Amino acid sequence: MFCLKRYLSSVFIILSAVFIIIGIGLDLYWSGIAGWGLAFVSLIFAAYFTKYIPNEKQDKKS
């Protein structure tokens, strides 16, 4: 499972873009606000999972 965690950051960034596109595209009363809210939460998760991205500089030193 550890090797999959480094890809979660990019998955959440793509997911936030999808939330924004769907929220704006639905053209309902609260869909834009809900889309931006879900995008904000997914970007917070993306920032959290950046700690699992391997640092190549530290790997080369070891």
Image (cartoon, helix red, strand yellow):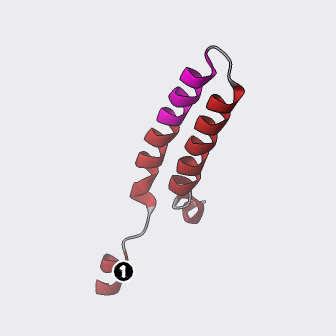
Q: Residue furthest top?
A: 29
Q: Which residue is mark 1?
A: 59
- Secondary structure under the numbered disc 1 in the rendered image: helix
Q: Position of residue 42 (x, y in %)?
A: 52, 39
Q: Position of residue 36 (x, y in %)?
A: 52, 29
User: Does residue 52 show up magenta in the picture?
Assistant: no
Residue in view at x 46 percent, y 51 percent: 49
Residue in view at x 63 percent, y 13 percent: 29
Q: Residue furthest right?
A: 26
| Crowd rating for badge 1 (residues with CA inside 10 Å; few <14, some 14–19, many 20+) | few
Q: Please state the extent of the stretch shown in magenta in the rendering.
A: 30-41
Q: Position of residue 17 (x, y in %)?
A: 57, 44
Q: Disc 1 residue type?
A: Asp
User: Does residue 34 show up magenta in the picture?
Assistant: yes
Q: Quadrant of the C terminus?
A: bottom left
Drawn side of residue 5 relative to residue 54, left or right? right
